[in-house]
Image (cartoon, rainbow, N blue to C red):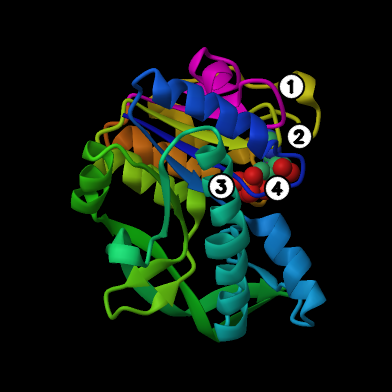
Amino acid sequence: MIVVKVGGSAGIDYDAVCADIAGRWKAGERLILVHGGSGETNRLAEALGHPPRFVTSPSGYTSRFTDRQTLEIFEMVYCGKMNKGIVERLQRLGVNAVGLSGLDGRIFEGRHKDSVRVVEDGKTKILRGDHTGTVEKVNTGLLELLLSAGYLPVLTPPASSYEGVAINVDGDRAAAALAVALKAEALLLLSNVPGLLRHFPDEASLIREIPAAEVESYLEFAQDRMKKKVLGAAEAVKGGVGRVIFGDARAGQPVSAALGGAGTVVS
Ligand code: ADP
């Protein structure tokens, strides 16, 4: 089993990702696709007059502050445009893909965090009304049902809280939880960079290999959102996933290239 997570940043070639996945799926590989949609969510939020608000935690992690209106915009993009766009591509390629959010069948479940500690203008504040959380449980039964019947699951945040409330969760860490729950042999985190760069944005500074036991020490090279990917990778390898690869989704055969060792391999 391979879990592929493709991000939502500018420059990602979804046609290339879907074509590569379709080829591998038809050749008999078992895989699940998880996707993001942050770039498009930012655009729609601006257009709807509710611009995104990114907050930084005291430990330096950046996240989207998700009030109810933001959550609804988030769902329009992630569960709507992005999810159906990917499912349509795969269907056109002859793959019977089924697009679901983490809410559906409680595929991704976790605790709802209503308030968040943030640092703004050098001061720590508490913001309430946040619809966020972290995936703690995965409904593998539903996914196995789909896979065994020949459907390729295409998954996206939000997740469901234990109370059944939609929560925004980080896609990389959700994919990591999924890979652990399914005992995947590999987790691919594909984005618009060649991998983890030692000196971002210098693409020549690609880090090629990271020993699993040392992955957390590489957090220092990751800025803002890349930190969540490194954290997800650490969680996945700790949970028994064989390898995690940070790969490039901008062109070519992104999945095959990453599995072939292009990008940053954590193992
Ligand atoms: P996605 O939405 O595609 O999953 P993110 O935007 O969440 O991707 O994270 C990838 C981004 O992280 C890159 O586009 C890059 O701007 C940023 N980044 C920060 N530090 C690094 C680094 N050291 N190496 C690579 N990318 C980095």
- Of the image marks 1 and 3, the number of the one nearer the N terminus: 3
- Of the image marks 1 and 2, the number of the one nearer the N terminus: 2
Where is mark 1, residue-wise? 205
| Residue 223 seen from this side | no
Q: How much space separates mark 1 and mark 4, taking CA atoms? A: 20 Å
Contact check, label 1 and label 3, Cβ < 8 Å:
no
Quadrant of the rendered image holding ligand 1? top right
User: Tag 1, which secondary structure?
Assistant: helix
Q: How much space separates mark 2 and mark 3, taking CA atoms? A: 34 Å
| Residue 19 seen from this side | yes
Give the class, few, some or many, for how many residues have Cα within 10 Å of label 1's Cα (few <14, many ≥20): some
What stretch of residues is rendered in magenta?
242-267
Rendered image: mark on residue 142 = none
User: Tag 2, which secondary structure?
Assistant: loop
Where is mark 2, residue-wise? 200
Give the class, few, some or many, for how many residues have Cα within 10 Å of label 3's Cα (few <14, many ≥20): some
Is residue 257 part of the magenta span, yes or no? yes
Q: In this view, does 254 lie above or below 7?
A: above
Q: In this view, does 27 lie to the left or right of 73?
A: left
Name the image quarter holding the N terminus: top left
Where is mark 3, residue-wise? 88
Question: Residue 100: where, in percent of width, then height?
Answer: 41, 57
Contact check, label 1 and label 2, Cβ < 8 Å:
yes
Q: Can you tell me whether the CB of the residue at mark 4 lies under 8 Å from the nearest atom of ligand 1?
A: yes
